[in-house]
Amino acid sequence: MRVVTTAQPLDVQPTPLALLLLGREADPKSERGVECPGDLPSPSDPDLVARARAAKEKLGDKVFILGHHYQRDEVIEFADVTGDSFKLAKDAAAKPEAEYIVFCGVHFMAESADILTSDDQKVVLPDLAAGCSMADMATAEQVAECWDVLTEAGVAGATVPVSYMNSSADIKAFTGKHGGTICTSSNAKKALEWAFEQGEKVLFLPDQHLGRNTAVRDMGMSLDDCVLYNPHKPNGGLTAQQLRDAKMILWRGHCSVHGRFSVDSVNDVRERIPGVNVLVHPECKHEVVAAADYVGSTEYIIKMLEAAPAGSKWAIGTELNLVRRLANRFAPEGKEVVFLDKTVCFCSTMNRIDLPHLVWTLESLAEGNLVNRIEVDKETESFAKLALERMLALP
């Protein structure tokens, strides 16, 4: 028998965090959750399209708009270049004549662009609340405490930090200061090979899945060579002996979108679509990567589909905006492209950059008003750039 109880209504006032989640406030440094709303709102009204075109035309060569692959189509339409986060930051650095770099992506990406561009260029993020849940999973204070734990265990001197591009400027600076390098999902193996030439162990930040997949799948290590450091537990939840025995010390962080994919998703799509090729991003869980046919970065995924034969079928495990764009692009070539999971999931932080925010940004700049500038302080920038330069020097 089910017992139903009633309670008196509570007089609850919304907290600042609740207001943020409701979209009524903005936090420039953090966006914690990733929701799956089922679909995005209908496209913005035509007036906004015309206004965006007019403002961009008025700015001319003074503005350079970067569009990450995971952005909405209505934003990508106005991007001068598209790509992953590091490619876009490099594109910005190669455009010194542009006074304004409008980065349609998330906070850490705009920080990287500011680090790599000249002091004369101003990097702008159309919505300061466009953060990254993964990047937020490793703070400077937490990583400093982790290094203290490694020092107490007697392994810090033998440990080289390797940080994923999807990290804050503070974490990149920590990496540079402690002799480490940055990596992307494309060159993670090269970065780890370099790191193991410098030391005996790697502290991999902040995405545990990319670190584990690269170490085990690409470099022949075992899962036992990896330990998971949890910043919310004393000593990371690890003993000193576990830290001494490990080769890969993985930070307990992940991408909330890629982390949704499961082996059940893979099995289900194979049952529904006979002969399908499963292609996933290395930010997916290890068991999903092991069950897939192909694994690679967003650029790799695009190139695989470009080279695929007509009539081939593909299930893609990455953010839905990109998958939909690829499905539409390759449909005329007879290539079937579907989303790996049945549950529709956009990256809610990426989707905070919408056409209204872009129009407001461009019109403000056209009127001479600098808004939402992302600026990394000089000390942080110098150490972060050092880590990035080590990556650029990789063979």
Image (cartoon, rainbow, N blue to C red):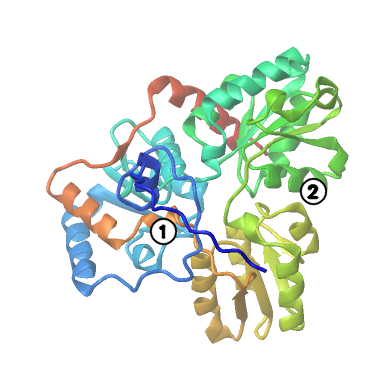
Q: Which one is nearer the viewer's eye here, 354 or 114? A: 354
Q: Position of residue 247 (x, y in %)?
A: 81, 31
Q: Nearer the viewer, mark 2 or mark 1?
A: 1
Left or right: residue 81 versus residue 316 is: left
Q: Position of residue 236 (x, y in %)?
A: 70, 28
Left or right: residue 345 versus residue 44 is: right
Which quadrant is the N terminus positioned in? bottom right
Q: Which mark is residue 351?
A: 1
Give the answer, above or below, for where 312 lies relative to 14: below
Helix, strand or loop for disc 1: helix
Q: Which mark is residue 189?
A: none
Q: Which one is nearer the viewer's eye here, 75 or 135? A: 135
Residue drawn at point x = 32 percent, y = 72 percent: 43
Left or right: residue 158 versus residue 67 is: right
Asked whether the viewer can see residue 232, the reply is: yes
Give the amino acid type for the residue marked by disc 2 in the picture: Asp
Q: Are marks 2 and 1 in contact (CB under 8 Å)?
A: no
Left or right: residue 332 versus residue 350 is: right
Give the amino acid type for the residue marked by disc 1 in the picture: Asn
Helix, strand or loop for disc 2: helix
Residue drawn at point x = 21 percent, y = 54 percent: 360
Mark 2 surroundings within 10 Å by alpha-carbon count, few (fewer than 14), some (14 through 19), many (20 or more): few
Residue drawn at point x = 62 percent, y = 56 percent: 258
Tell me the quarter of the picture where residue 343 sits: bottom right
Q: Earlier in the sequence, mark 2 or mark 1?
A: 2
Which quadrant is the C terminus positioned in? top right
Residue drawn at point x = 16 percent, y = 42 percent: 369
Q: Which one is nearer the viewer's eye here, 349 or 194? A: 349
* Number of marks: 2
Q: Which residue is mark 2?
A: 218
Label 2 to label 1, Cα distance in Å? 32 Å
